Amino acid sequence: MFDNHNHSQYSCDIPQGEGSTIREICLSAIEKGLSGVAITDHYDIDGIYDGYFPPLDHEGIYRDITEAKAEFEGRLSVYHGIELGQATHMPAEAKEQLKKYPYDIVLGSVHAVRGITDFSYTDIRSLSVAEYKALWDLYITEMLDTIDWGDFDVLTHITYPKRYYLANGITDFPDIKSKGREYFEPILKAVIDKGLTLECNTSGLRQIMGECLPNADLFSFYYELGGRDITIGSDSHHCRDISANFKEAMEMLRNIGFKYVTRFEQRKKYFDTL
Ligand SMILES: [Zn+2]
Ligand SMILES: [Zn+2]
């Protein structure tokens, strides 16, 4: 099993002195019995260019991953990835970055919509009902734009803002149990049509949502629409969380009918039994 979504101490959202080195991540992955791990540090392109996040040390990451690949050869596959946030806000810069390194896997993420920094830093509680519903609509639009842009492999953690809505006590936003299918149908269809992979992000099981992103209902809908291409990622920000909650996630996915998980090497797909 591979964990396809992990952050090292280099990630721009991890304060200095916290987080784990790439070597520590690899050692933890081996201890947990994984066959591979992808290092996918945050590159929230607009936040970095705006000075909201510190620049990402791409060279340091590349050096440490290269060393880890050599040290753990034969014991663990170490993949060089990147979590590209808001690529559509600066598509030329995103394209340029992807040319600079021989990435194994590129995660496509929407953490923010135009005009706000990140859902995790937005004071959602201060918004009116109309405003936070409009924000949800913008999130959907931004994801469709991201899929349309398309220079990535895996669409990550869809329903991401839900975590922050719930943390702010807001529960009456469109969700899979009400209008979720209407909202997410174009996104799931576009993922399938573009040949992209949908991520099962297990971080929600460690947080207020208590479910994967997306949840079982939405994965069932993806399956009904013909979607079969999935990855699993813990979205760990510390090596202790590598492959956290994979057991529950795998069981949920198998129960729906998924038979394999995708991994990426040099941005080519390989399929492993789930
Ligand atoms: Zn993310
Ligand atoms: Zn992440």
Image (cartoon, helix red, strand yellow):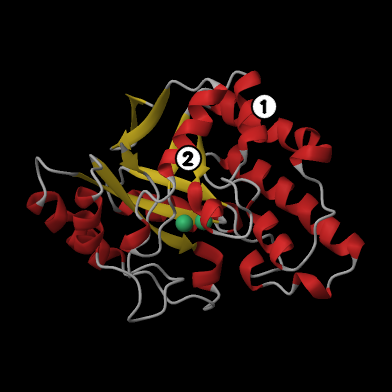
Residue plotted at (43% across, 50% down): 234
Q: 237 or 192: which is nearer to us?
A: 237
Q: In what quadrant of the picture does the N terminus appear?
A: top left
Image coordinates for residue 91, horizontal then vertical, percent: 54, 53
Mark nearer the N terminus (1 vs 2)? 1
Image coordinates for residue 161, horizontal then vertical, percent: 67, 57
- The Cα–Cα distance between marks 1 and 2, rounded to whole angstroms, is 19 Å
Image coordinates for residue 87, horizontal then vertical, percent: 54, 53
Q: Is residue 14 above or below residue 216?
A: below
Q: Which mark is residue 129?
A: none
Image coordinates for residue 266, horizontal then vertical, percent: 28, 38
Residue carrying label 1: 221
Q: Amino acid at mark 1?
A: Phe
**Structural crowding at the residue carrying mark 1, measured as other residues with C-alpha within 10 Å and reported as few (<14), some (14–19) or many (≥20):** some
**Structural crowding at the residue carrying mark 2, measured as other residues with C-alpha within 10 Å and reported as few (<14), some (14–19) or many (≥20):** some
Mark 1 or 2, closer to the camera: 2
In the structure shown, which secondary structural element does the residue marked by tag 2 occupy?
helix
Q: Is residue 196 visible?
A: no
Left or right, residue 156 beside residue 80: right
**Dots 1 and 2: beta carbons under 8 Å?**
no
